[in-house]
Amino acid sequence: MTSSIKPGTNRPIRSYVIRSGRFTTSQRTAIEQHWVDYGIDYDAARLPLEEVFPGGAHLIVEIGFGMGDSLLQMAREQTESSFIGIDVHKPGVGKLLHGIAEHGLSNLRIICHDAQEVLRNCFDPASIDQLLIFFPDPWPKKRHHKRRLVQTEFAELACVKLKTGGTIHLATDWQAYAEHMMDVLEGIDTLENVEGSKRYWDRPNRPATKFSRRGQKLGHGVWDLLFRKR
Ligand SMILES: C[S@@+](CC[C@H](N)C(=O)[O-])C[C@H]1O[C@@H](n2cnc3c(N)ncnc32)[C@H](O)[C@@H]1O
């Protein structure tokens, strides 16, 4: 996870760059007003899921929800499931908080912190039913490949946190990243490709996201991968 340390420094290699600015008033106000109700402050300790979602439910975690439109849509449609969204992009956090409050959702909460640390420190083993990562930053330059979120170490951690029978759904519009994802996930013994060895998922049940629409406009292909924990 962030155990990959930048050579010559003590700094971990991150899969994101925090960009400042571009906050709308509505996003800023939503954070001020609604974080207290729908946000979860990061703490490097076990998250008491039984308190966050009393009664328990099918738990779906989305890493890197961006502006959050697709996560909001899924939470509105799948009211019987509980959702946790993790991202570091504060304008997106503000936008999603606004949506959660507007629709009065009780099944969606947000953590604004590095997802690799959240996954490692906050979730018990075998606690997640579905892990979603849609259009993670592709880091296309070779010298940046180490920044890609989906790496063997990350996938092994994700696998520990998934319940038996739980799934990990990845999507990307970068063919080279899709192939890398496939190699990484196929290389983990405890995961099986739901579509069959080396096969992508042709008809994913995933809402469109900001980045899937952007990829479409640019004429990119889209590759979805669905793996299940044995
Ligand atoms: C290319 S955007 C895709 C957003 C969205 N899933 C979509 O399809 O529109 C990638 C998102 O992942 C987030 N991200 C990347 N690495 C992350 C990490 N380690 N922890 C939390 N968020 C991360 C970024 O902040 C950004 O919002």
Image: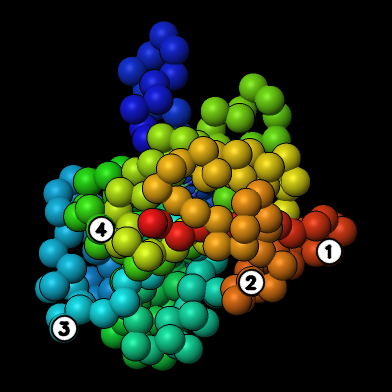
Horizontal arrangement in the rendering, residue 155 relative to residue 21 (left or right):
left
* Residue at position x 53%, y 33% in the image: 147
- In the rendered image, which residue does mark 3 sit on? 55
Under mark 2, the amino acid is Pro
Under mark 1, the amino acid is Lys
For residue 201, which quarter of the picture? bottom right
Could you say which is closer to the camera, residue 88 or residue 143?
A: 143
Q: Residue furthest right?
A: 219
Q: CA distance from mark 1 to mark 2?
A: 19 Å
Mark 4 and mark 1 in contact? Answer it, CB < 8 Å: no
For residue 2, which quarter of the picture? top left
Residue 137: % across, % down: 60, 46
Q: Does residue 15 appear in the picture of this structure?
A: no
Label 4 SS: loop
- In the rendered image, which residue does mark 4 sit on? 126
Rendered position, 200 above or below 174: below
Under mark 3, the amino acid is Gly
Which disc number belongs to residue 204? 2
Which disc number belongs to residue 217? 1
Label 2 vs 4, first from the N-terminus? 4
Q: CA distance from mark 4 to mark 1?
A: 38 Å
Horizontal arrangement in the rendering, residue 170 relative to residue 9 (left or right):
right
* Residue at position x 25%, y 58% in the image: 126
Q: CA distance from mark 2 to mark 4?
A: 24 Å
Q: Of circles 1 and 3, which is in front?
A: 3
Mark 1 and mark 2 in contact? Answer it, CB < 8 Å: no
Q: CA distance from mark 3 to mark 4?
A: 17 Å
Q: Does residue 182 appear in the picture of this structure?
A: yes
Badge 1: few (under 14), some or many (20 or more) residues near its Cα, within 10 Å?
Answer: few
Residue 163: % across, % down: 30, 62
